Structure formats: structure tokens, C-alpha cells
Image: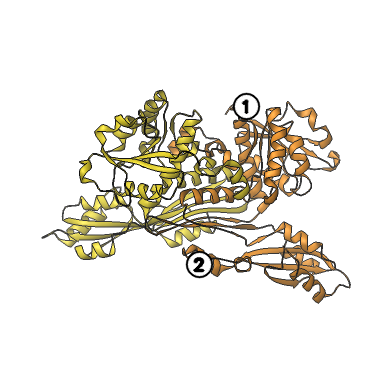
Chain colours: A orange, B yellow
Amino acid sequence: MGTKIRIAIAGYGNLGRGVVAAIAQNADMELVGVFSRRDPASVTLLNSNAPVHAMADIHKFKNDIDVLILCGGSKNDLPEQGPALAAMFNTVDSFDTHAKIPEYFQAVNQAAEPAGNTALISVGWDPGLFSLNRLFGEAMLPQGETYTFWGKGLSQGHSDALRRVPGVKAAVQYTIPVPSAVDRVRNGELPALSTREKHTRDCYVVLAAGANEATVTQAIVTMPDYFADYDTSVNFITEEQLQRDHAAMPHGGFVIRSGKTGAGTQQVVEYSLKLDSNPEFTSSVLVAYARAAFRLNQQGSVGAKTVFDVAPGLLSPKTAADLRKELL
Amino acid sequence: MGTKIRIAIAGYGNLGRGVVAAIAQNADMELVGVFSRRDPASVTLLNSNAPVHAMADIHKFKNDIDVLILCGGSKNDLPEQGPALAAMFNTVDSFDTHAKIPEYFQAVNQAAEPAGNTALISVGWDPGLFSLNRLFGEAMLPQGETYTFWGKGLSQGHSDALRRVPGVKAAVQYTIPVPSAVDRVRNGELPALSTREKHTRDCYVVLAAGANEATVTQAIVTMPDYFADYDTSVNFITEEQLQRDHAAMPHGGFVIRSGKTGAGTQQVVEYSLKLDSNPEFTSSVLVAYARAAFRLNQQGSVGAKTVFDVAPGLLSPKTAADLRKELL
């Protein structure tokens, strides 16, 4: 390896911390800086001596960064930051609002392409590695069904929804696949499964002072989109219990493609993740795709891209010849 | 869809039959012919009216075929056919002698590149989809170990080895992962596993007239490379039992990457296949990659390639915009 790929991070939350740690595991990369909207003097990086800069100054670093990894949230940060930063840098982000991906792709592409930058959007495990497995599944087995199960894992979006319920002081939500549904899919039964049949939702809630358990429970289990279509359990705990037992962010899940070939021969393909830390794993995926973004840009492949556009060999620090020899 | 991709097949055995069936599941493709070294009049295709031609005439079809799928064996057919046919056509093959892949890649590349053809080599599930998962695993989790388990499944190579033992009239061999080893890997224990600890081998043997069970068993369990390093069971059965109970060709296995992120956080990624027909699944993979070979060639990307070089989106008949909308 000659020169290292110069990576910077925009946004220092759980994901940003994970990216710092992941870069340290990749010998061909170096972290050249972290950009934050907070006062840089107030941000102390964990296990890194990289400088922290004000996000407002990022345009001054155009020549110092090969790939910028965007670690902001999909709801408020990325819709604005994604296009703005792709106009200045090669970027990788984990935009995960599935329904808005086409619109986000267009906005990022319009910024990245004229600037000659490469912007990999919606990288992570879902969207990301799970999306790849949905694609592989239906490409290999055109006659079949794809099933995605999530969990057991802590869902950030559903935990946020709980916290907006009046009377809830703090809360976490776990998404849990229904074991019998998973078994039926694995057995190649091709079942038609309702939303309720696929996942259950377990909530751990700290009540606000004076709030009523029954009222809060009712508000949660009837909440449209988030809980009404699921079997939801609500468990009331203390703040101490929440901090002691629910601080980790595990997640995971399965993508299963069940299909038929020839005269009805059954074939089942399964991809599964068992993650003790969702943000740390997502960060590791972002960093591998940062390598690919850098290489795509060097090849002249510019504009917005997704995991579907990335030849897998671009993710590895190994040469194509070594990959053929060692991994094929 | 406008014009269909014109696919032809070289070699009509189990794999060739599977390719005929797989093409029928893909609306954007048509089978334009099968080439065989046998007398074409003696070859009757299953579920297809496509013409059968003599392999010796294949050079006459240079303008009629978009992609030729090579369905010969890796031992005797492909080392010769691969380069010869890649000089005339875009090709896809399932060359699976892992140790000889670099050499085979060079030979095919030297034929394909000057001819402006695209040749995807070593496509299938191992090498192929399993290779991809080995690559993804180490790219995402650089600190960790990758484990590949095969089976339960019928191994063609080991069955062939059994049939070469004096006193064996017919035989099949099943490769079986050791469940406790798989469990330890799935639990993230990162065990060091010897060959014997990972798989067992079950043999079902029909004795030749006058042969001795003890002698044959001894010859099998001590055979270097194939059986000596494994716990091998040898079961003697009748020819009727062999045909009744062991005619199917199931296979499958797992690729598991177990790694650590951050300060020792455990992350486990698993890819698994449960195939009721190994050749039919391999054929389905070949056909999806034939679509990619056609598109790569249209993009001007010529020479020998592997699954590592193929952006996943090229495998799907869907447009990039539809993929982003439906599968990302």
C-alpha cells in the first residue's frame, strides 16, 4: 500500500464513533478529521488524535479529503447534508428512509455528478447488505418469494416513537421476529405472512411522574404505523433498569429467498446478521464502501450510486489477483 | 423488454439441463441452441424446442449468440473449452478447481480480451456466491475469521473418488458439517478447527461382485486428501437402494464471518444455502451472470472476470431506478 485513503467524518454520534473505530481496523485508510456542528473544542474523540473542525469550515478541506463519511440522521440531517456535501466531496452515507430513496438519490446525483464526485447512498445493512441479498435472491431464483425479518434488535425509530407518547419519560423498543414464521419460511413453505405474523414488538418504558400505565399502554399499542399492526407488549421499568439492562444496541435479522427451480425443486438462500452493536457494524460497512467510493471516483465513475452499483472486489484492500487466489 | 438476450449452452449434462430450465424462468432471455460433442440427433432436450448442434460447428454461430454458457466439467472440459470458446463468444462457466483458478483466469483472459469478449469464470455457489460472502465478510469485519462449511450434500468429486476404489461398483458420498463446530462458530467463539472437526463424510457403497467389505472400507477411509483427514463412515447398500434413496443431488452449506468491532463487540454474519438440487441452483446462478456478462460486454468491459468484478445490479432484469425503489 502506498498513500492511505484520507477519510473524514461529518457528524460525531454513535455512527461517527463507530467509523473512527472501523478506520483503525483498515491499514489502507487514515482518519484526517471529524466535522461537527457543535463547538469543536467541546468534542473529544474516543481513541483518536484526529482533529475536530467546525462543520461550517468544511469547504476549506476540499483538497484534503478523499472520502467524507456522513454520519448524520436520515430524518433531519442527510436530506440537506447529502446533496450539499456531495457537491464538494466523494461521500458515503447510510440514508435509510426507504420510501424516500429515489428522491434522495436524485438530489445527491444532481450535486455529485457535475462536481465529478462519487456519492454512495443508503449504505449499511438495511438498506445495504440486506438489499443486496434481496437482489441476489430474486436474480438467482426468479420464481420465489423474499422475506426480510428484523431483530431481535433495538429499533431506534420505534424507540423514538415511544418517547413522543405523553407520559413516557424514556423508552426502548425491541423488534422480534416470530420464530414459527421464520421456521416456515426456512422450510420453503412460501407462507403469506401478515405484518402481525412476522414480528412482535417489546417496549420497555419509564413512566413520567404522575403518568398512568393503562393510558400510556393504550396510546402505544394503538399507535398507527408503529404499533397498531403488531402484537406489542409494554413493560414498565425504572430509569435504573433502563440504563442497566437496555443500553446496548444489538440488532440483526434475516433475508430469506425461497424459490423453485426446474420442476418444482426447492431452494432456500438465507443471509443473517447477529450484531451486538448495530451502529458499530453499520460504521464498518460504511468504511468498506468508502474504499469503493474512492476507487470508483478514480475510475471516473461519478454521481450518486448505491450498493447495487459497486462490484464487490472494490470493497477489499486486496488486489484482484489476490482475491481470485485467496477467496474465490 | 425489447430484444431478448440470446443464450446458448455448451454441454448437455446435469448443468446444461438446469440451464435450459433456468432460462425458461427469465423473460428477457431465450435459448437459441445447445451444442454437444455427441451426435446432435441423439440428444433430446427436456422441456425445450431449441435446436441441438454439433460442438464442432459452433464457430458458425458467432453472430447468433450473445452469451454461451459452458456446462462442461472443470477437470477435463473447461481447461480446453474455456479459452477456446471465450475467443469466439461471451461466456460464463463454473470452473471450480479452486487451486487452478489463477492459471485458468489467465488462459481465458488471453483469449477473451483480444477478441473483445467478456468471460465470467468460476460462477456458481462455491466458487461464486460463497466467494462473495467470504469477500464481504472480511471487507466489513477486518478483525475476524471466516468459516466455510459444506453440506449436508452430495459431493461429486468425493463420489467419483469412491468409484475409483477397486471393489466399488457404485457409490455416493455426503459431506456433513459437524453441528457442534457450526454452533461454536455461530456463537462467535472463533474456534480453531481442524479438517476433522469441521466435516464428516458418509459413504454409501455398492460392492462389486466378489469384493470384500473390510478391504474396501480400509481403502476408502485411508485415502489421502479425500477421506484420511476425516471421520468417514462407509455403509454398504444394494444397487436398488442406491437408485431409490440416493438419486437426488442436494447440497448447501454456510459461510460465517465472525468478527469484532470497536472495543471487542461481537458481530456474526452468516450466508447459507439449502439446495434440493445442486446442479439446478448452480445453473440458475450461471444464467443470472449470463445477463451480467452480456451487459458488461455492451459497456465495453472485456476479458476474463469473476463474481468479484460484477456490480450486483447487472444481475437483475430490473432497471437501476426500479431496483432502488423496490429492493434497496
Quarter residue A262 falls in: bottom left
- View extreme (bottom): residue: A214
The residue identified by callout 2 is A184
Q: Earlier in the sequence, mark 1 or mark 2?
A: 1
Looking at the picture, do discs 1 and 2 lie on one chain?
yes
Amino acid of disc 2: Arg
Q: Is residue B299 visible?
A: yes
Q: Position of residue A252 (x, y in %)?
A: 61, 57
Q: Is residue B127 visible?
A: no
Which residue is at the front of the view, B296 or B150?
A: B296
Q: Is residue A314 left or right of residue A72?
A: left
Amino acid of disc 1: Thr
Q: Is residue A247 left or right of residue B102?
A: right
The residue identified by callout 1 is A3
Quarter residue A30 falls in: top right
Q: Is residue A73 left or right of residue A259?
A: right
Disc 2 on helix, strand or loop? helix
Task: Give the alpha-carbon distance from disc 1 to disc 2, as whole Å.
Answer: 51 Å
**Residue at the (45%, 41%) spot, across then down:** B289
Q: Position of residue B19 (x, y in %)?
A: 37, 47
| Chain assignment, label 1 | A
Disc 1 or disc 2, which is closer to the eye?
2
Q: Position of residue A178 (x, y in %)?
A: 59, 68
Q: Position of residue A267 (x, y in %)?
A: 43, 57
Image marks 1 and 2: residues in contact by CB distance under 8 Å: no
